[in-house]
Image (cartoon, helix red, strand yellow):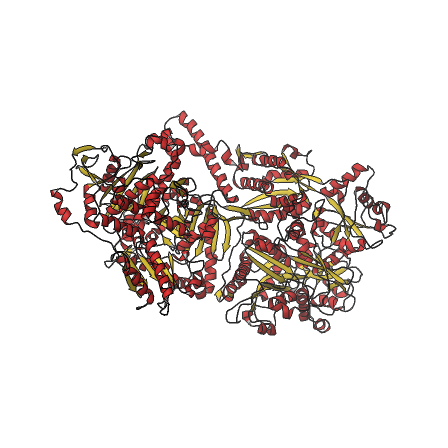
Amino acid sequence: TGRRRSMGGVRVTHEEDDGSGGTMTTTMGVGSVTRGRCQRERRGDPRRRCAEEDGGLVRAHSLRRRERGRGVSGDEDDDRCRYRSMRRMAGFVACALMMGLNAREAAGANVVGAGASFPALAIAEAIDAYVATGVDATVTYVSMGSDAGVCRIEDYASECSSDTYGTENIDFAVSETLLDGGEYTSYPDLQMYPILAGAIVAGYNLPNIGDGVVFDAATLSGVFEGTITDWDDAAIRALNPTLTLPNQNINVVVRDDASGTTMMWTQGLSAMSSSFSSNVGSDSDPSWSGRYVKRARGISVASYVRATSYSLGYVIHADALAMSVSVASFKHSGSTEVVAPSAESITEAVTTSGLQFGNNGDDASRLTVDITPVTTNARAWPFTTYSYVILRTGMNGTSASDRLRSGATCENVAATVAFWQWFLVSDQAKNIASQYGFVPLQSEIGDLVIARMTSDIYCNAERVIGSDASSTTANATASVVIPSVLQSTFSTLRSIHEAYNSSATLATSDLTTKAAAISELVASNGMVVGMDLVDSPMSALSQLPLFSLAGRMGFNTASVLGLGTGTGTALTLDRDAAAVILNGTATTWGHAEIVRLNSFLDGETTPIVLVGIDDASGDEFYAAYISQFVEFDADFVIETPSVTASSYDEVVALVIETNHSVAFLPNTVLLEYSSYVSASSALTGTVAVAMQTYVFPSLTGDSCVGTAFQSAYATLSFLEWMASDEQAQGLAEADGLIADFAASDAVRATYLANIRAVTCDGISILNPASDGCSSSSSSGMTPLTLALAVGLGLFMIALLTICASSLSKSFFVTTILNQYKRSHPPSELEVTIVVTDVQASTKLWQLVPLHMNKALVVHDKIIRNAIHQSYGYEVLTEGDSFTIAFHSASDAVKFAMLVQEQMHNYRWDRELLKACESVYSEFDREAVVQQVQSKRNKASEMLMSAFSKAHVAQDDDVSMSPRFALAFNSASKIVMPSINGLRVRIGIHSGFCESRYHPTTRRKEYFKGAVPIAHSVSECATGGQTVLSGDAMAAIVGQMSEGVKKFYTLHMGRHLVNITLNDAAELAVTVGEGGDLQSQSRASSRLSFDKLNSDAQDTPHTLTNSHTRMHWTVPDSSDVESIISAEDVDINTAEGVRTYKSKMRLLVKLQREMEESSLVSSELVQAVPKALSARVGLFSHLRTVRQLEPSYFDAPGLDDMNVTIAYTYIDGLKELTVALKEVMDESIAMLNTCIRATLRVYNGYECREANGEFLLAFNSAADAYGWALLAQTAFMKLQWPKRLLTHNSARRIRLARRDVFVGLRVGIGISSGPFTDVRPCARTGRTEYFGHLLNLTARIARSAAGGQIVTDYDTLMQARAASGYNIDFCRDLGSFALKGIAVPVRMVQVSDASLLARAFEDIHAARVSEPTVDLFNADDAEVSSSIAHVTHRPLCVVICKSGSIVFEAMRCVGDGLPRDDVLQIELATTLERAIDALSCSTNPGTVNSNILVITDEIEGINSMDACQYVRRHLKLRSQPQIALVSSPAMRNALVGKFTSVGADFKLPEITSSANAESLENFKREFEAVITQALSMSIADEEERAGA
């Protein structure tokens, strides 16, 4: 049955003589049109056109005539490919051609091949299976003969001038004919690779004699030379003493076209017989002279042999199997053994001669060999040959440039190599080849070929890396008993279903008797498909509609339509006309009933030749259909056919070879052989035969465990898939079947409901979660309950009985749920995407190609094993990169941890390890430099110390492993932990996306949304590292609380990742209040500002996320007067104006950064398996565009163990939540977004957040105060929900036209001091601080009123001493006793000029002493005298040559600034000097106050690379704003890449010869950069100056 599988993904071209001296060419292209599309068409949808559909048979032929060219007429019968695939292709091609679709447009890379038909069937079905693995490629193979394929891979224009087969440009050719020396000289980039071993056999037809006829070299050569002409020749009789051979002439049939099959056959006979060599010779198209019958293409030879008695011909083994042709055995000279063609005998031939590369005179490196004939091994089949694929090796020293086919790119080359590598290792390809009589080369030869492909093939001077995506062996089998007419259809459905669910397959068997069917059903928990089983024992089972199948009359096309007037184009028949043919009433084609519908046959006296099957009554379909004629006419009796056969395949062969013949055939068979046999019209008056499927409605006991349960699950899953998938229904309908289960939506719903209602022990097999027992999973007995039950006597026994049942059901449900995940692709509405990639694989391929080939085989096996263990779904494989979808984030991380551990633990080849050490040392050195330059040594050291002490903050205080390889010596030199072998980087993101089922492969494809984000996250990682997005980490915590104990996590901050604005515009991104992924574009940003309309007095700006729109009344102008006039506020003092202006500048700058950035930002988290804990501190940087917010390594205080902590809380939160439940979630989300947006302005670090209340850390108290004051102002600018503002705790309070309070009122407490310990939190990976300071700050915060900022006196004084913090608007509150604090704490209210209107009652604490009138008294004199009034001067570093005009122009601009200390400009001639200067520059707390200008004047410094280098080597607080001076060369290089390299501004190029206008233009641009980049810093300076 497998031999009749379809060939999705194949384009085949059929040529046949049309009787007029020309050639009629029918081209079938593969498209994909769902059943729904054709239905729309039939309803008149003007957008689509479908081919005429008549009774279930769909034909779409694109016909053209051409003159027959001499050329090469075809190696093997390309129709063989076509008739094998017609069932599936016919329906699809009809719509595809008429809509102008082509399969190549539906996939990524389009691979085109052409050539031999010897292996065409195997290649065709292998393409079907390969595309079903989910690759983003279309593979097309055109069968036209070896020579035709070879000339196309060489050069169509000069080598194929004499043929007109079409398909001029190809990526690969397949041939049995070898290239000669001249061809290698002309085309040195060609290389042949063996891919299959197959047999050429002698097929014969001897009535009453089946298989078993024996020939030897002398008899075969004598028959085909013409010296042996009779079957009872003495030489043949001597070899077959037990057979009675007829005294008949041998009807010898040979090929009438040039073919590799003929070449191998004649080559073998020539080597065996000198006489044959002299008279016929070795040739692909010899001059057969004499009495030979000639047929073009191999399938025609096989059909002739099957239909003609006493015939003999040579065919490929697959054709003989397909047409049930008897095959001769062979006796080697001097041997007593007889060998038949089989996998074993072909393997013997390959073992004997297949490794003798170069035995034909070629260089052994060509990988060619002459296997035929094998004469030294009596167990080997002598006529064995390789099929070779011919590839272009590209620019590797043998050619001046790549010779790609027209329109192809390196992507096509990689896809071509990937397909053939898969073909050589895949279990599916092996099975497919075997069923067609071939032996796949998957041992030493296959390994050698893969290694050679990998090392030989280049494109654009880069080695091409293919893919080794071997298929997964199914572990569950659905047993199906079906009528023989459905075998080919279910074979096709099996292939597609295996692609959909790689863990399950179908095992089909023929329906014989009802008793045997019910026996098989009981034994296998499968299903039975029958036509009329109502009165059988199966009538008690669930009976569901499945298919209906119609039949028609098939006839010999040319001989029948050429009768009569010769004008016939089709044969029209109805029930009456068919009846007179079948019962013998009509003996000639001119019978009245036939002429009634076909006037062109009037008067025709040619006899009708009726062909039928041997036992019509024994074939259920045949019998069921004939019964309809009996119902119409009780006297109807079918006439004994003129010719009979044992199967429908053989009936077709007889019709092909018998003129004026006709046979009744199922639509499935007629579609399959429509190239050879035409079908009549639908037989009006008859109805299609209905077939039902029978399954058990419920299972119990042993049927619910082990393989019995798996079989039941696989069976029901298959039925569910078939009913739910329109593509599967389209495939069945293309076979000529009618899908009764999908007759209407109601019928389909009922069908699915019945399937899903099948239970095991009362639990639904397909939907276990819907049953009541699912609750037992969550309420099962705990070990504690069981322990308490011990000693309770009879009650204990009862309790244990209940518990055992509960646990059993719980385990059963878990098993079913896991099985569901394994067999169903994840939903696009909630999916976790994982992307893996091997770091620096290209360099490794260049160093050790052979070892890399083996290593990637291991890598792929590790990946796929981990996918299987983690219930993943392989979406796409590109080279060594995998894209995998998971149902849950916890499964995804389990997969990643398995991969990293197994890759590390594998014993790699020594040569590969040496290559890895050489290649990866560059990355290790870079990591060391990053650690040193960013001063993260201390952070890594503390991290190592925390782990070694088991100090990782976890909710349940689970200890951590003390295994480390990070080490620090006294000189603080880092010793990097070793990573064994290949390094895989893994990116994980959870979210939603879009999906579809590929029209050809039926694999689920995921795109947009989570997919590009996961790819970008993967690109952020270094080899050996696993990086999760914030969404993935949140999903893990929510899905599996135990999961966080199995690996370590480390927060890596928020980063800009490399997704451009165009990509971001298509993302469907959910952003939660926890800081999930966000786009940094105005169109899709989590935080964006809408511009203020110039004609609107009160139009607000908006902060936007997916849940809320937060409106800010932040004006767009940075002009002071515009800011003040645009706001409805009352500020009467100059100091108030300056303060308010400073805050507005900060918000405007934040707004501008968001508007101008075109990239996506995301929280990123690193995950490491416990066994590899040392890696947590290995990667302190990520390979992103830039870091936006601090990571664990940037957390404040790690250098000196001192930190400033800020706690926030919402005043009246409980009351608000109770009273305003409907708006509080939105309000808190708005508040959280606002806090996080403003936090980055002062480099604040979020340690944790819960329900709108934050624990924050800052580098200094001044930073904390600055943020708190900015945040309090920002809170009033949010457009809170109107319902919120009705509550007393959030209502708007104004004073003299000035807002004092608006919305949620947030109390903030701030304190500085040392902490005792720091650790990463196991749930979030963020920094957790420990010590007295945390408790003190929390108490201070809780004592503050809503909207109030409170700090302790000592912290304020430290800020004043360290940075000159302005305390003029701070108010002493007195000393207070705080719970848990041993000594009273003197507390101070922090404010500024813009918040002075706020008044608060006493704070929530017990006062110990009253406040002083003046904040500073005599006791503070010592403190006051020590205050360092620090003035920050922003730094601008210019990377250019000494004396550069760029530097001089910038100094000129700097000198013209209003104040001398606004900007300090320095020159640097190296990157290292620039980084040192920026690292040493002090920062008062605002980010990005320094500027770096990069020119391309310094040799060896590439501007884009330098930009990325700075982003990855500077600590976050030292990150500057970067401007690039763009020369023409740089402008071209920066097209589409400006933001992705981390740059902020562009400056025009000026040279020493620049005119005055150009110089002034440059100065204006630089002034604009200063204005934007330094707005915050300048604002701070103005505020200090006013103070």
Whether residue 866 is visible to the viewer of this picture, yes or no, is no
**Rendering coords of residue 1346 (x, y %):** 28, 35
Side of 1418 relative to 1444 (left or right)? left
Which residue sits at x=48%, y=65%? Answer: 462
Nearest the eye: 236 or 357: 357
Residue furthest to the left in view is 1418
**Rendering coords of residue 712 (x, y %):** 56, 39
Residue furthest to the top in view is 794
Q: Quadrant of residue 1566?
A: bottom left
Q: How many discs mark residues in the rendered view?
A: 0
Side of 1009 relative to 262 (left or right)? left
Q: Quadrant of residue 64?
A: bottom right
Nearest the eye: 337 or 1141: 1141
**Rendering coords of residue 769 (x, y %):** 49, 35
Nearest the eye: 1130 or 940: 1130
Side of 370 relative to 1339 (left or right)? right
Nearest the eye: 1063 or 228: 1063
**Rendering coords of residue 532 (x, y %):** 70, 37
Whether residue 743 is visible to the viewer of this picture, yes or no, is yes
